[in-house]
Image: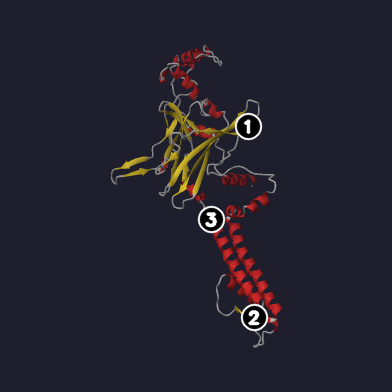
């Protein structure tokens, strides 16, 4: 069983190795590197940048006073020093801090005796402004990143396949907990699956596009309430030949990406999630969340039912087989195109008389299921399918914690 490429919380399960000149490339984009590193390293860098600058300039101030002879004439009241009240390295450090941050307590100050001291004061003042602007900018950029905004965007734990408007469709639900909206929200999805080219090359992680209604504008969302996303399974869909039985055999991952602009900051945010075959429920739809309250005239959204699904009548076959049955002139009630119930022993003899090869005609396939008294639909329980991939992890953190528990 293949693990997730994208965890439920959006983290990517990928490790990069053997990158040439990796550190040099990261340093070339130093601002992005500093914003991306963890907070503890960010704050450590913040403290070290100021502390080192204070110490370096304190040493320079001490050398200026030492070279001028100020430290040898501390008791001479007639001696005019470069900086008044610098008597040791400690006092030079205090003067460095006061100069860089324009504190100005009033005791220590430069004189016109040493031009180098005046130039040094100008240089340190400019450096202090630049250093403080850079450090503050990095911390502010890290604080205002819209990455955490994705924590309040929700994806349903399972996806559903059911019949809608006469076609088999893949459904999933997205929602937003906050009252502040995601502006220009739009959704896209890709299916990660192995592909074999005509030349025989195997592409293990090929990306198939999953159409969510781009041409009709259905991929653009108004996330005031949870929205059900519909993917029509047609000839261009990677699920065209997928049947309920294939969900237990196929190895794929459906990755869903929600992007939009944070209303309060104007920055773009992205939320991701994924679905494995065991999380695609055949013959289910999502439970309704929105109810109208007559008492206050408001619409109420019950997020406790956000992930809930209910079984519905759904053809037990692939969308391709269903389209072939419909094209042959059969009514939907006659389009029995799936595995028969295993508990009907009387129909087993009839099944043996039907040809099971790839060249079986539509008529013989239809006759096979017309002879049975079994249901035309299959209603699957979500638990059984979910347990098939039940030992998968929802996030990188849960995977690491589970690994540490095993090691102990």
Point out the tag, 2 or 1, that comes first from the N-terminus: 2
Q: CA distance from mark 3 to mark 1?
A: 39 Å
Residue indicated by mark 1: 203
Query: Could you tell whether 238 is left or right of 308 in the image?
Result: right
Query: Could you tell whether 73 is left or right of 13 in the image?
Result: right
Judge whether residue 10 can be spotted in this image: yes
Point out the tag, 2 or 3, that comes first from the N-terminus: 2
- Packing grade of label 2 (10 A; few <14, some 14-19, many >=20) is few
- Packing grade of label 3 (10 A; few <14, some 14-19, many >=20) is some
| Residue 147 x/y as whole percent | 52, 49
Residue indicated by mark 3: 141
Point out the tag, 3 or 1, that comes first from the N-terminus: 3
Q: CA distance from mark 2 to mark 3?
A: 43 Å
Outermost residue on the left side: it is 295
Judge whether residue 93 can be spotted in this image: no
Helix, strand or loop for disc 1: strand
Residue indicated by mark 2: 113
Q: Residue at point 62% right, 27% down?
A: 197
Examine the rendered structure and indicate whether residue 160 appears above or below residue 130: above
Instruction: Judge by depth and name the residue closer to the eye, 269 or 11.
Output: 269
Examine the rendered structure and indicate whether residue 143 appears above or below residue 221: below
| Residue 20 x/y as whole percent | 70, 46
Helix, strand or loop for disc 3: helix
Q: Nearer the viewer, mark 2 or mark 3?
A: 2
Instruction: Judge by depth and name the residue closer to the eye, 386 or 330.
Output: 330
């Amino acid at each position: 069983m293949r693990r997730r490429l994208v965890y439920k919380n959006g983290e990517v399960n990928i490790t990069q190795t053997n990158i040439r000149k990796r550190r040099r490339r990261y340093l070339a984009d130093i601002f992005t590197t500093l914003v991306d590193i963890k907070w503890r390293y960010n704050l450590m860098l913040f403290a070290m940048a100021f502390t080192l600058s204070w110490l370096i300039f304190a040493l320079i101030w001490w050398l200026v006073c030492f070279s001028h002879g100020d430290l040898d004439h501390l008791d001479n009241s007639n001696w005019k020093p470069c900086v008044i009240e610098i008597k040791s390295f400690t006092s030079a450090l205090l003067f460095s801090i006061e100069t860089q941050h324009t504190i100005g307590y009033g005791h220590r100050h430069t004189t016109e005796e040493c031009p180098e001291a005046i130039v040094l004061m100008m240089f340190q003042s400019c450096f202090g402004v630049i250093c403080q602007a850079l450090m503050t900018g990095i911390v502010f950029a890290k604080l205002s990143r819209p990455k955490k905004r994705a924590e309040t965007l929700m994806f349903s734990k399972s996806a559903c396949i059911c019949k809608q408007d006469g076609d088999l469709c893949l459904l999933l639900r997205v929602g937003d907990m906050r009252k502040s909206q995601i502006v220009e929200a739009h959704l896209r999805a890709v299916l990660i699956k192995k592909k074999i080219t005509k030349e025989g090359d195997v592409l293990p992680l090929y990306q198939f596009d999953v159409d969510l209604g781009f041409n009709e504008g259905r991929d653009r969302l108004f996330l005031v309430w949870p929205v059900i996303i519909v993917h029509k399974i047609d000839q261009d869909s990677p699920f065209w030949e997928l049947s309920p039985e294939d969900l237990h055999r196929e190895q794929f991952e459906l990755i869903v990406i929600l992007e939009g602009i944070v209303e309060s900051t104007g920055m773009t945010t992205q939320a991701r999630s994924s679905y494995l075959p065991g999380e695609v429920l055949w013959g289910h739809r999502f439970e309704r969340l929105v109810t109208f309250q007559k008492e206050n005239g408001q619409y109420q959204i019950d997020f406790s039912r956000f992930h809930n699904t209910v079984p519905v009548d759904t053809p037990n076959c692939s969308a391709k087989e269903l389209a072939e049955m419909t094209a042959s002139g059969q009514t939907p009630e006659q389009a029995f195109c799936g595995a028969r119930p295993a508990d009907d022993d009387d129909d087993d003899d009839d099944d043996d008389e039907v040809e099971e090869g790839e060249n079986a005609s539509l008529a013989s396939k239809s006759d096979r299921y017309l002879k049975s008294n079994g249901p035309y639909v299959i209603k699957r329980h979500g638990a059984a399918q979910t347990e098939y991939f039940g030992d998968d992890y929802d996030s990188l953190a849960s995977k690491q914690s589970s690994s540490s528990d095993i090691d102990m």
